[in-house]
């Protein structure tokens, strides 16, 4: 079921979680709004709070670098990227990022949706990576 009506999320208008280290993830599109086709978050990640190398089994991950500098690790490759860079990461490919400097902001879309609720869990939930199809080393 494709998007049935416009989805407009203003700046700081989505549900947000903030870590103890000041990284934040804001919900931009919840998969329930897109008929499950995709979900999207705006992620401001501080150096030292990057995810571990991980692999998705259920969705592809699309990443646009809004600001900041990163080293993207995809499989054995390491690529330095900055604002305007874009990555389409198919499921099954191990990947992570390393922030260069203080922080970076990424617009991340998951296709199909659902994984956005791992990053922005509902109140009281403690999501299990395995329940979301994530493999961590």
Image: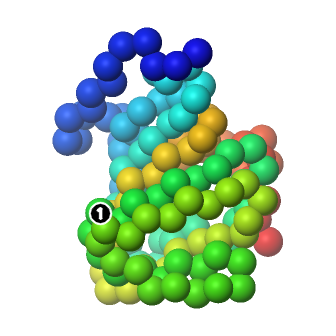
User: Would you identify the image quadrant in which residue 20 lies?
Assistant: bottom left
Element marked by disc 1: strand
- Residue at image position (54%, 34%) is 38
Quadrant that contains the N terminus: top right
Q: Position of residue 79 (x, y in %)?
A: 52, 85
The residue that disc 1 covers is 66
Q: Position of residue 4 (x, y in %)?
A: 43, 12
Camera sees residue 107 = yes
User: Would you identify the image quadrant in which residue 135 lies?
Assistant: bottom right
- Residue at image position (46%, 52%) is 108
Q: Is residue 11 left or right of residue 31?
A: left
Between 25 and 62, the one lying in front of the other is 62
Q: Does residue 103 lie above or below 18 as drawn?
A: below
Quadrant that contains the C terminus: bottom right
Q: Position of residue 92 (x, y in %)?
A: 78, 59
Q: Does residue 25 lie above or below 39 as drawn?
A: below
- Residue at image position (32%, 34%) is 14
Camera sees residue 20 = no
- Residue at image position (51%, 64%) is 87
The extreme left residue here reads 11
């Amino acid at each position: 079921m494709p998007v049935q009506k416009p989805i407009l999320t203003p700046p700081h208008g989505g549900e947000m979680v903030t870590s103890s280290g000041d990284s934040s993830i804001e919900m931009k599109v919840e998969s329930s709004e897109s008929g499950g086709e995709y979900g999207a978050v705006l992620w401001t990640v501080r150096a030292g709070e990057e995810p571990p190398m991980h692999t998705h089994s259920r969705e592809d991950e699309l990443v646009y670098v809004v600001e900041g500098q990163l080293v993207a690790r995809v499989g054995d490759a390491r690529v330095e990227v900055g604002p305007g860079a874009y990555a389409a990461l198919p499921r099954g490919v191990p990947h992570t990022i390393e922030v260069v400097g203080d922080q970076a902001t990424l617009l991340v879309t998951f296709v199909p949706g659902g994984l956005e609720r791992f990053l922005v869990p509902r109140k009281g939930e403690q999501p299990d990576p395995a329940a979301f199809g994530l493999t961590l080393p």
